[in-house]
Amino acid sequence: MVEIPIWPGSSSFATGSTPFGFYDTDAQFQTDADNVADWCAKRLGYPLVDIELQDVNFYACFEEAISEYSNHVNQFNIQQNMLSIMGTPTSSNLTQRNVSTNMGGLIQLATEYGTETFTNGNVSFYSASIDISIDKQTYNLNQLIRDVYKPTGSIEIKKVYHFSPPASIRFYDPYLGNQAMLDTFGFGAYSTGVSFMLMPMYADLLRVQAIEFNDMMRKSSYSFEIINNELRIFPIPVRDFKLWIDYVVKEERDNPLKLPTGTVSDMSNAPYDRMQYQHINSVGRQWVFRYTLALAKENLGYIRGKYGSIPIPNGETTLNAADLLSAAGTEKQALVEELRTMLDTMTRAKLLEAKRAETENLNVSLNATPLKIYIG
């Protein structure tokens, strides 16, 4: 006859009794481990029937239940906070910590567009100058930039500083006087001014606009075109000067690995670790207890299924392995769905929706409350 170890009726937890030892040093876990083992054994029928499990089996189920609870809660938190924690260092443990919402992920996305709109960006801009010669319009950028500045990859021209002279340097005030007033405003080097009269702003704007319209309609427009790395400038240069150009290296712009290493990229390296059992509240512990029982029931079902039946005097008895496995599977699934449902009601969108409904209902109640009349 096969000797099957059975539950002796009590246990005494010691460090190293669980498979992984995740929570062995947690004082609250050490206290609850024996209580949970005793509770599970009695829920399975002890002492009316023998329970073919030992303390280490219950401890393993208890450890797995805590890790399962931690896993589901951490998954939920990662989903809720991923946009806020992407790009942050992976060295900080965010488990059971309040993560403040921020614009980090959105700003990181906007920064990519900022490179193209010259408002911000995470791509280095490089400058180069070209010597423009009189009466020469066309210049080979490969020769003038690539061969001279030797960038590390193919380049893309982002800005060419080729503009008409500003109207302000050709602006003359119709009134005589000295430079005192314009010197005060920092414009003394550009045009004459008066010290006894301040003209309205629209008068200055009209003169500037007249100068710019004159250049636009009566002169060749300052412009350029780039075709097959050939730069052509307009109008035909009438003097020698330096033309400055801003460019980016395409390999740097297209490189997706702009953030430093050791930062959060996805849920696989989001810094959420296993919870500390002592910090799980009573609601969470109750879920853990019930899941531990389901795991113990499943474990007992596998063991009894191995033996099938046990000889007894004048016959044998069939064990209830199938019933245990079926019940354990159903209970585990129900517990996971229960936890998931609870977490789904706590998303930021659902909480804000509930807060809005609460505010609306409060306003309705307050509007129906009679107001006191004060007579002075």
Image: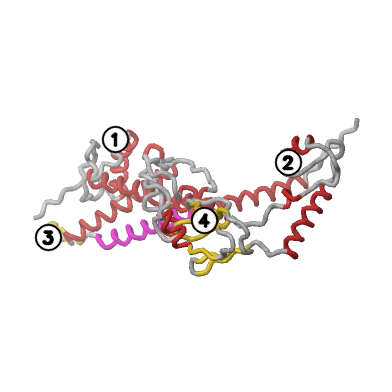
The residue tagged 4 is 130
Q: Contact, CB < 8 Å: mark 3 with mark 1?
A: no
Q: Earlier in the sequence, mark 4 or mark 2?
A: 4
On screen, residue 195 versus residue 63, left or right, reads right
Q: Contact, CB < 8 Å: mark 2 with mark 1?
A: no
The residue sitting at 26% across, 44% down in the picture is 59
Q: Earlier in the sequence, mark 3 or mark 1?
A: 1
Q: Which element is circle 2 on?
A: loop
Q: Contact, CB < 8 Å: mark 3 with mark 4?
A: no
Q: Is residue 104 magenta?
A: no
The residue tagged 2 is 187
Q: Residues within 10 Å of mark 4 (few under 14, many from 20)?
A: some
Q: CA distance from mark 4 to mark 2?
A: 30 Å
Q: Which element is circle 1 on?
A: loop
Q: Which element is circle 4 on?
A: strand
Task: Identify which residue, 252 or 187, lies in the foreground.
Answer: 187
